[in-house]
Image: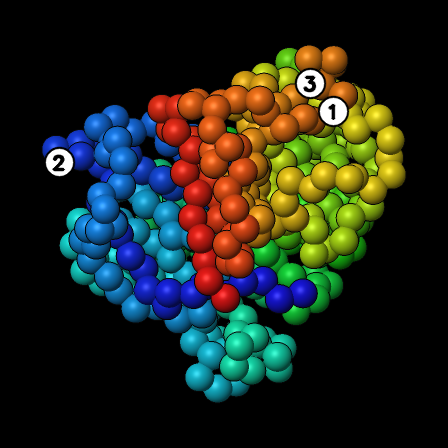
Amino acid sequence: MRLLRRVWHAVVLVGVCALGAVAGDWPQWRGPNRDAVWNETGILERFPTNGLKVRWRQPVSWGYSSPIIAEGRVFVTDADLTKPPGKERIHCFEETTGKPLWTYVYDVKYPEWAFVAGQNGGPCATPIAEGGKLYVIGANGHVHCFDAKKGTVLWEKDLWKEYQMREWICRASPLIERDFLILFAGAKPGACVMALDKKTGKEIWKALDESVSNSSPLVINAGGKRQLIVWTDDSLTSLNPITGETYWREAMGTSNNDAIPTPVFQENRLLNAERPAASVLWPESRAAAKRTLSNTSTPLLQGNYVFSVKSGGVEVLRLSQRRNRQADLADEHGDGSQEWRKRPHCGEWRWCVPVYRQRRFNSGTARP
């Protein structure tokens, strides 16, 4: 599989907040709560006709991860693929000016195709920042914990050396639960998911002897328990994030090309997770779905509405009131216009993460 490459070859900071508004951090994949909800105030009501003002721009190389923002710094990963062996890099920029603050570089062995023009590889997982530290996992399982301010390595762990792993397999973004750094790394034996002590890098637990997917996990509160939700190529599984114990497992064979979106949870809806057990409410049939939200872009769930972005445009679905057994096209949302429900096909790839803020739904476009 070839994921869409970072197209712009640059980290770009644009002004979305009105003058004087204070921006909050975006310290991990899909934001502070991993739900793609943006809680800023003073944001622009609409984009200017000539587009947003670019505050600064810095060149970067190939990669698939999203930049994050924490404590006045922007962090992003990329790969130097000038010649084999490749190098993975972690960059830190000052948030307000784009001034480079530090860069860390290490050697990595990439497959031959990664150096072919048009098929370039690069790190996939979005870093995560917490408590003045930055945690990064590279495409081949190189895990680093940095002092986010200085860029010094506090600890590192090479999963490639300690486990059985395939090349370029670590694509899901890590998360932090209490004192644990949780990785969806696809290691074997029995370490498709693992938890490391975030202070030392020591393995705490490992779980699941399944094939890893590209979907980033999340932790939810449901049924009186904290549940780690992991979508592998073989199942949707709920684990105890502290012990790795399985709460429930729903067998669900999926192609690695399709298991990319992060599971979405809201008001006890996650296919359904009301307690440490689960049952499928819809679709009633286990046959291949007639409607696909997107096999790349994570949908956004707000109330009874599902926002989906795919190559055909933006689609809004409304969950049926009949126990959510099916998803129907919404009759209206916002102004109820046809353009809002589904935009015309524009011949562009859409690999973005939709974001919700103040009854507004934002998405982006990437050109191949």
Nearer the N terminus, badge 3 or badge 1? 3
How far across and how far down the image is residue 302, in percent?
A: 52, 23
Q: Which residue is mark 2?
A: 19
How far across and how far down the image is residue 42, in percent?
A: 21, 28
Along the horizontal axis of the image, is 36 left or right of 317?
Answer: left
Q: In the displayed structure, would residue 231 be above or below residue 43?
A: below
Contact? badges 3 and 2 (CB < 8 Å): no
Is residue 43 in view from this perspective? yes
Q: Amino acid at mark 1?
A: Gln
Graded by Cα atoms within 10 Å as few (under 14), some (14 to 19) or many (20 or more), the crowding at tag 3 reads: some
Q: CA distance from mark 3 to mark 2?
A: 41 Å
Q: Amino acid at mark 3?
A: Ser
Q: Amino acid at mark 2?
A: Leu
Q: How many circles with numbers are drawn on the protein?
A: 3
Q: Secondary structure at mark 1?
A: loop
Nearer the N terminus, badge 1 or badge 2? 2
Nearer the N terminus, badge 3 or badge 2? 2
Q: Which mark is residue 320?
A: 3
Graded by Cα atoms within 10 Å as few (under 14), some (14 to 19) or many (20 or more), the crowding at tag 2 reads: few
Q: Residue at x 38, y 57 (%)?
A: 76
Along the horizontal axis of the image, is 51 left or right of 207?
Answer: left
Q: CA distance from mark 3 to mark 1?
A: 6 Å
Which is more toward the observer, 306 or 290? 290
Image quadrant in which the N terminus is located: bottom right
Q: Nearer the viewer, mark 3 or mark 2?
A: 3
Which is more toward the observer, 207 or 23? 23
Residue 103 figure quarter: bottom left
Q: Secondary structure at mark 3?
A: loop
Along the horizontal axis of the image, is 191 left or right of 145?
Answer: right
How far across and how far down the image is residue 45, in percent?
A: 26, 31
Q: Residue at x 13, y 36 (%)?
A: 19
